[in-house]
Amino acid sequence: METKRGVPNILGNGLVGVGLVLFAVAVADAAGVVDVRFSAGVYLIFVAISFVLAWLLRSLT
């Protein structure tokens, strides 16, 4: 499953996917649609960390 750009690109794209899911959870929590364990701000911090790590991994290739 290795692409032309290699494993860091695959991991970076996976982290972008995780960040998008966490962002959706944060928005749903802020809108009151779901009741989750942490506040929306905590999920947004994890989103920022995921996006930064994804950017770093994708810039390695």
Image (cartoon, rainbow, N blue to C red):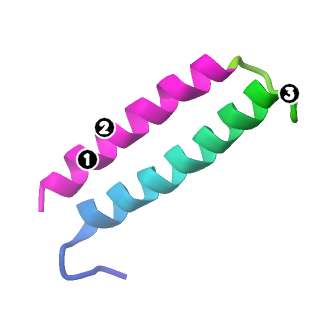
Position in image of residue 10 (x %, y %)? 34, 66
Please check the rendered image and state whether residue 51 is part of the magenta-colored stretch, yes or no.
yes
Q: Choose mark 1 or mark 3, whichever is in front.
A: 3
The residue drawn where x is 67% and y is 32% is 26
Is label 2 in a helix, a strand or a loop? helix
**In this image, 20 relative to 9: left or right?**
right
Relative vertical location of residue 12 with respect to residue 25 in this rendering, above or below:
below
Q: Which residues are magenta?
A: 40-61
Three-letter amino acid code at the position of disc 1: Trp
Left or right of residue 19: residue 58? left
Residue in the image at 21% along x and 44% along y: 56
Crowding at mark 3 (Cα within 10 Å: few <14, some 14-19, many 20+): few
Residue 37 lies within the magenta run: no
Categorize mark 1 by other alpha carbons within 10 Å: few (<14), some (14-19), many (20+).
Answer: some
Q: Up-down: is 34 above or below 18?
A: above
Q: CA distance from mark 2 to mark 1?
A: 5 Å
Query: In the rendered structure, which amino acid carries the disc numbered 2?
Result: Val
Residues at discs 2 and 1 in contact (Cβ within 8 Å):
yes
Tell which of 60 and 34 is nearer to you. 34
Label pair 3/2, CB-CB below 8 angstroms: no
Mark linked to residue 52: 2
Amino acid tagged 3? Gly
Judge whether 56 appears above or below 35 on screen: below
> Residue 55 got which mark?
1
Task: State the SS at label 1.
Answer: helix
| Magenta-colored segment: predominant secondary structure | helix
Quickly name the residue at label 3: 32
Which secondary structure, mark 3? loop
